[in-house]
Amino acid sequence: MIYLTFLESALLALVIYAAALGVERLKFKKRLSKWQFKKTGVLSEKGSRLLRSIDVLLARSGVKSKLPFLDAKNMMIVSVLLFVAVIYPFRRLGFAALFYASSVVYVPYAAMMFMSTVNAKKIKEAYLSFLTTFIGFYNIEGNIINALKSTAPYISEPLRSIIKRNVFLYEKTQMSVDECLENMAAEAGSREFRKFINFAKMNAKYGGNFNKALMKLREQGEKLFSLESIKAANASVGSMVILIMIVINLLLMMNISADPDIVYIVKNTITGQAIAISNAVSIVFGLYMIKNINSSA
């Protein structure tokens, strides 16, 4: 039991150190620092970087469009309630229960990452069609917002809804063109679409030959289309397989925790605790891999 206590203390210290290190690193990261989203749009203006990243995930996964009331703060409350509810059935596993409960809480976020990747793949597939249609309407309208509004009905989901929703917000609120375009780019989460938005924002501010930029974007998009589609497909499949295995693993461990005989061995022996903790760590690593796969897709 002395060795077991020492092992648990060492692991707890490692977790605390990793958490503290992560917090320090967050202070130096400036990604997304310029993203400002409105309460009537995708994100709220205020809040920590963590809340903004959750709002981005909610928007890109499509959950925000189906559940408009679900924002980052509500999602954090749901996560806390889920942790409290889930840690109870795992309580018999000892220190490992913290890992399993945390993993269950993170599963919805991993699922949203998978959904975001699927949506990003659809947006990449629709991007060339979008550009071609937009170019035609821009030559007629001569205005970026009006051209986007006219283009939306002719492209596939989820890009259609993203454009329609943000154009509607632009027309009904005091949102600027720059903010409207930025919201579209953040919600879409596509690198190629982001390039289009950046050129559109520059044109809206400074003018210039936007048609020439659009032709260049279409040429680049045609070259990258095949490679990007393969990467997105691999990310979707990899994320889905890992997520399914994690859910099965968690269900099995929850079932094991209901058996007193097995729980006694797991909780009161070094081997049992080592197995439980290493299994929990592998689940956490799997969830991290989902995040890593989708962030690089």
Image (cartoon, rainbow, N blue to C red):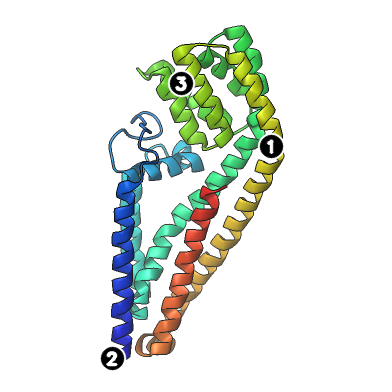
Q: Which of the 4 image quadrants contains residue 195?
A: top right
**Residue at mark 3:** 168
Q: Amino acid at mark 3?
A: Phe
Q: Which of the 4 image quadrants contains residue 275?
A: bottom left
Q: Position of residue 224 (x, y in %)?
A: 67, 37
Secondary structure of the residue carrying tag 2 is helix
Q: Position of residue 147 (x, y in %)?
A: 57, 15
Mark 1 residue crowding within 10 angstroms, few (<14) / some (14–19) / many (20+): some
Q: Position of residue 186 (x, y in %)?
A: 46, 34
Is 273 on the left or on the right of 213, as rendered? left
Is 264 on the left or on the right of 197, as rendered? left
Task: Give the distance between the C-alpha atoms of the residues marked 2 and 1, in whole angstroms.
Answer: 59 Å
**Residue at mark 1:** 225
Residue shown at 49%/54% (left/top)?
291
Q: Amino acid at mark 2?
A: Ile
In this rendering, is residue 213 above or below 222? Answer: above
**Residue at mark 2:** 2
